Amino acid sequence: MTGAVGDFDVNMVPRVYGASELGVLSITAPGEAHPRVEYVGGELFVGLDADDGSAITQAQAEEWERPFLDAVAAAVATAGVLPEPVDAMVVVVDDEALASAVLVDPARASSAQLHGAPVVFALSRRRLVIVGADDEAGIARVLDLAEELYDAGGPLVSAHPVVLNEGAWAPFPWRERFPSLEMRFERMLRLFSVRAYEVQTAALQRPDVRYIDPKIQVLETGVTTTFAAWPKGVASLLPVVDNVIVADPSGAVSVATFNEFLDAGGDAIIRTGLSPARYFVPGAPPEMG
């Protein structure tokens, strides 16, 4: 679509955002420089990019005469139709304009022939998957796709699915609907969390504090957990994980659950405003090199 931004015209295309990406952008592009977005449900938002790939910002959108949501609606109006389900189970959308259209206009998802109400997994910007709320096998297939995307190493959007409920997207209560898939869902949540923290670290790195990334550990029971290793005495920003490994300069190593670690640190450990969440653990600045 074409719209006015200040005194010039641009061709705008829709863009899918997740909460973790917007959390990073709230630091790297705050205030008027932050992308203007519309909330659509769960952890999902839709914004607009100019034809040069730059995001339409809060400041730019405020200059428009018409509401931003109208501009988004116009941008997605020409998106195509949904592809046919794969293996009669899931609809895979690999076009971001169409993915945005589904999120902005949930009625589009109703055209898919699915088992139950449409459930959307916005796994990445160009991989949105729609499956029926009653289709356990289909949702298991989506979890396969999520793990494949993680293994591919690219940026991810959200591990939290939304379901069409009374014409709008709402969080999908997968724990209640499919308890047999709990272990697989929990694994997906942890994989996506690890990737979100990695992106945050790359964007916000600073010399006076160490950004610690979480790691994945699969227990003998098959349960997927996360852990982070804190070098004792070093000022750090610690991600939320299942377990914290404390490495003492003497060489001693101890392990605590995340809550145990917070309790031991008391008021000295402070939750920051970062998203995804991190806790500041006081100490000396990390050594360079």
Image (tube, grey):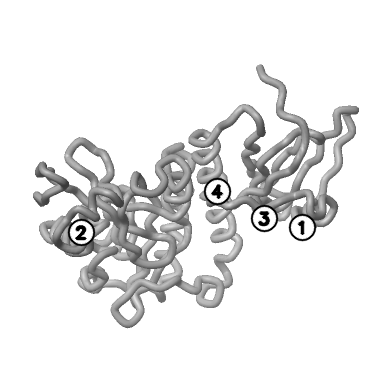
In primary-sequence order, the first of circles 2 and 4 is 2
Q: Quadrant of residue 40?
A: bottom left
Q: Which residue type does callout 1 highlight?
A: Asn
Q: CA distance from mark 3 to mark 1?
A: 19 Å
Judging by the rendered image, the residue that carries numbered circle 1 is 259
Judging by the rendered image, the residue that carries numbered circle 4 is 191
Residue 267 left/right relative to 36: right
Q: Is label 3 in contact with label 1 (beta carbons under 8 Å)?
A: no
In primary-sequence order, the first of circles 2 and 1 is 2
In primary-sequence order, the first of circles 4 and 1 is 4
**Looking at the image, which is closer to me, 148 or 88?**
148
Q: Where does the image place residue 114, in percent across and percent down from the top left?
A: 30, 72
Closest to the camera, between mark 4 and mark 1, is: 1
Judging by the rendered image, the residue that carries numbered circle 2 is 72
Q: Which residue type does callout 3 highlight?
A: Val
Write the residue at 24% across / 50% down. 48
Q: CA distance from mark 2 to mark 4?
A: 31 Å
Q: CA distance from mark 4 to mark 1?
A: 20 Å
Q: How crowded is the residue under tag 4: few (<14 C-alpha within 10 Å), some, or many (20+)?
A: many
Query: Relative to 237, does residue 259 appear above or below in the rendering?
Result: below
Write the residue at 47% across / 57% down. 159
On the rendered image, what quadrant is the C terminus found in?
top right
Q: CA distance from mark 2 to mark 1?
A: 42 Å
Query: Relative to 98, does residue 204 appear above or below in the rendering?
Result: above
Q: Which residue type does callout 2 highlight?
A: Val
Q: How crowded is the residue under tag 3: few (<14 C-alpha within 10 Å), some, or many (20+)?
A: few
Residue 195 left/right relative to 65: right
In primary-sequence order, the first of circles 3 and 1 is 3
Q: Where does the image place residue 264, in percent across and percent down from the top left?
A: 85, 52
Q: Where does the image place residue 255, in percent across and percent down from the top left?
A: 82, 45
Question: What element does badge 3 sit on?
Answer: loop
